Image (cartoon, helix red, strand yellow):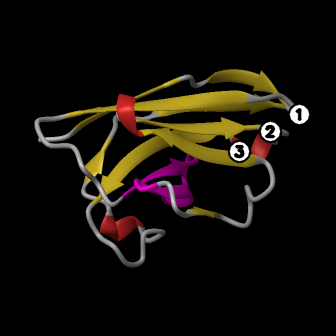
Amino acid sequence: QVQLVESGGGLVQAGGSLRLSCAASGRTFSPSAMGWFRQALGKEREFVATIRWSGSSTYYADSVKGRFTISRDAAKNTVYLQMSSLKPEDTAVYYCAATNTVFHVTDIERYGSWGQGTQVTVSS
């Protein structure tokens, strides 16, 4: 059983930065990839970024490309999302998730383990 715990959310002004963290625990934690997703009020959960656990590849939604950076520390079983140049439309609950799939790692359906989410609010 994998447990994922997000932290680092909060309130920030437009143009500001936040760093989210997601710590994973479990007897055998060895995902193929970990991702960040977000869900704004009244909207469906959407893909933000994902990283292969090997660190070999990262993928981003077009809406965050160039502003967000995903990284991981395998020794700490932790994945990060550095968010810069934040916009009000980035306001959402951010979730981290883990998958064992090798293919289609940007697809939300591929992720079976989820954290509880952390709120990010960007004021204008």
Can you say whether 63 is above or below 3 in the image? below
Residue closer to the observer: 65 or 78? 78
Q: Is residue 21 visible?
A: yes
Q: Are marks 3 and 2 in contact (CB under 8 Å)?
A: yes
Question: What residue range appears in magenta?
Answer: 33-54
How many residues crowd around disc 1 within 10 Å: few (fewer than 14), some, or many (20 or more)? some
SS state under label 2: loop
Q: Main secondary structure of the magenta part?
A: strand
Along the line of sight, the residue nearer the viewer: 35 or 77: 77
Tag 3 residue: 90
Q: Is residue 71 left or right of residue 14?
A: left
At horizontal 79% and vertical 40% (from top left) the residue drawn is: 88
**Dot placed on the residue nearer the N-terminal end, 3 or 1:** 1
Q: Are marks 2 and 1 in contact (CB under 8 Å)?
A: yes
Looking at the rendered image, the disc whose residue lies closer to the viewer, 3 or 1, is 1
Q: Amino acid at mark 2?
A: Leu
Q: Does 122 lie within the magenta span?
A: no
Which numbered marker is on residue 15?
Answer: 1
Q: For mark 2, what is the residue?
A: 86
Local packing at callout 3 (Cα closer than 10 Å; few below 14, some 14-19, many 20+) is many
